[in-house]
Each structure stands twice: as C-alpha cells, then as structure tokens.
Amino acid sequence: MTAHIISLADEAVADILEQAEWYESQADYKLAERWENAVTSTLLRILAMPRSGRLCHFKSGALAGIRRMAVDDFPKHLVFYRFRGKELFVLRIVHGARDLDRLF
C-alpha cells in the first residue's frame, strides 16, 4: 500500500472553515460538524480513487489537470484538486454555482 499525503491550499482551509461557520450560524453545530465530516470522507474517497473526479476545463492552461468531485452529502459543493505524485493537493472547496473561472 502506497502512502499518500493530503495538502490543502490556504484557500481550501478557509473554504472549509467559512462554510462550517455559515452552517453553524444558519442551523446549528451539528450541521457544521456534518459538513466537516463530509469533507473528510470525500478527501479519503479521492485518495482511494484519485482519477474518479471529473477533469476540469478552465481557460487558464496553468490549471490543466485539475479535477473536481462533489462533497459527500453536499452535492452542490465541489472539491477541486490535483494529484502530484503521492500528494493530493486540494486547491478549493466551493459551491459549484460560483464563477469558477474567476475564482481560480
């Protein structure tokens, strides 16, 4: 079994925390906790099958190879990631309705 590393960009960490805070303020801590658990399970699912996420087609060539996968139980939120060797690098975790080309 090959060991993998999960790295999150600062923006991805901020995305997770911001969404958790929003869920807590709009509903309660249980929803925020469910969100955090869903993100974790999604990242583990990506580690198990890195190529299962859909390949993205951004205008910028610098973003070639970026994939996306919906967050478990929060299907409108997407994890944007790239696999580099043994590293899963998470760029952002955002709602899919955002202007993604502008966001990146």
Image (cartoon, rainbow, N blue to C red):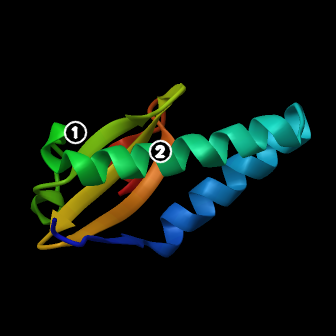
Image: 4 above or below 101: below
Task: Indicate the position of residue 32 as horizontal and vertical percent values.
Answer: 76, 43
Residue at image coords 87%, 33%: 26
Pointer 1 local density, CA inside 10 Å: few below 14, some 14–19, many at least 20: some
Question: Which corner quadrant holds the N terminus?
Answer: bottom left
Alpha-carbon distance for marks 1 and 2? 14 Å
Residue drawn 56% across the image and 40% down it = 38
Left or right of 24: which side holds 71? Answer: left
> What residue would you read off at disc 2?
41
Q: Nearer the viewer, mark 1 or mark 2?
A: 2
Residue 91 in the image: x percent, y percent? 37, 62
The image quarter in which residue 90 lies: bottom left
Question: Three-letter amino acid code at disc 1?
Answer: Gly
> Where 1 sits versus 44, above or below?
below
Kindly identify the residue that appears in the image at 29 percent across and 48 percent down. 46
How many C-alpha atoms fall within 10 Å of the one at disc 2: few (<14), some, or many (≥20)? some
Direction from residue 67 to residue 74 in the image, left or right: right
Q: Is residue 83 left or right of residue 69?
A: left
Q: Position of residue 62 (x, y in %)?
A: 14, 66
Which residue lies at the image location 22% right of the left edge and 39% below the top edge?
53
**Between residues 2 and 43, which one lies in front from this camera angle?**
2
Front one among 93 and 30: 30
> In the rendered image, which quarter contains the C terminus?
bottom left
Task: Indicate the amino acid at tag 2.
Answer: Ser
Q: Secondary structure at mark 2?
A: helix
Q: Is residue 89 left or right of residue 85?
A: right
Task: Identify the mark nearer the N-term, 1 or 2.
Answer: 2
Label 1 secondary element = loop
Do the residues bearing badges 1 and 2 touch, measured as CB atoms within 8 Å? no
Q: Which residue is mark 1?
A: 53
